[in-house]
Image (cartoon, grey):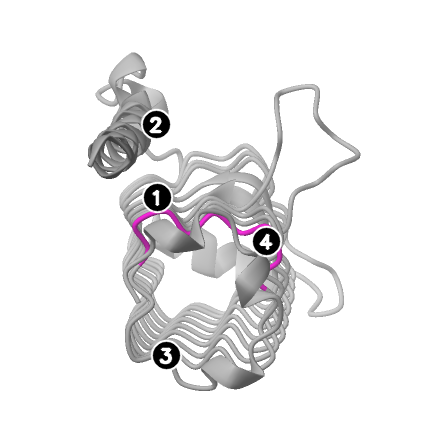
Amino acid sequence: MKSSCWAKVTLATAILAVAIACAIAQDMTRFLDLKSDDFTKADMTRAEVEAALAAVDPATPLDFSGRRLNGLDLSGLDLRRSKLQAARLNRANLAGANLDGAMLDQAWALDADLSGASLRGASLFATQLMGAKLDGANLTGARIVGDLSRANMRRARLDGADLSADMRNQSMGLMRGVLRSANLDGASFENANLARAVLEFASLRDANLRGAKLNGSELAGADLQGADVTGADFDNADVTSTRLIGLRGRKEARNLDRAKNLDRAFR
């Protein structure tokens, strides 16, 4: 009886600790002045962006590095291979834009709308996309080492994308893809690298995780109901309080028995 009660207390404590850590991480924006010019102003108009695109040689990537493009309507624009390092795109409308191969390293795009945008092969290193809309976006083959917490990524395509931890660059802590509390229902991560990525409390209902590398990932509190995990590798993934009900391809999943805290998952 005592061991049963102790197990319940331990589980409750673990769940509470994860919830607190999640809340702290999600509230990091409270330290930022989101009303400052850096987050609200734009130093270009859409017309100026379009003029720059028209004037440049198609073979030469356009350079918007460090520019403030906050709140601009850039929907549907062809920004392939554009340099947008450290650009400010907070609350910008990039719905349907073509950003294939774009460099978005260290860019800020809080609450930006990238619905249906194409970011195939794009680089998003240390990119801040908290609360962004990426539903239906195509991030096939993209390198994502940034924060997409609370992002809406329903039916997004991330096949072959790399969100794994960057073990070579840890001067600012472990850099990896963070999808905490993101809506990933119906998203496709086929053959994606999610090793050590953060997916705590994310919703992955009916997601395609076929062949995905989830080893060492943080899945505590995530919802994987109905997800296809055929060939997915769960070695050392933390599945505390993870909903693993109705998984498709469960028998073909790799190392699910080696996941951390599997006895505390809902299955």
Indicate yes or no whether the magenta region holds residue 118.
no
Q: Which of marks 2 and 3 is nearer the N terminus?
A: 2
Answer left or right for 21 relative to 142.
left
Q: Earlier in the sequence, mark 3 or mark 4?
A: 4
Specify start and end residues of the magenta stretch as a single range: 234-242
Which image quadrant for residue 60?
bottom right
Question: Does residue 58 sit above or below 73 in this rendering?
Answer: below
The residue under label 1 is 149
- Disc 1 residue type? Ser
Between the residue at mark 1 and the residue at mark 3, the CA separation in whole angstroms equals 24 Å
- The count of marks equals 4
Question: Farthest residue toward the right?
Answer: 168
Question: Does residue 203 sit above or below 241 in this rendering?
Answer: below
Residue 258, x across and y down, in percent: 59, 57
Q: Residue 163 carries which label?
A: 4
Between the residue at mark 2 and the residue at mark 4, the CA separation in whole angstroms equals 18 Å
The residue under label 2 is 25
Q: Earlier in the sequence, mark 2 or mark 4?
A: 2
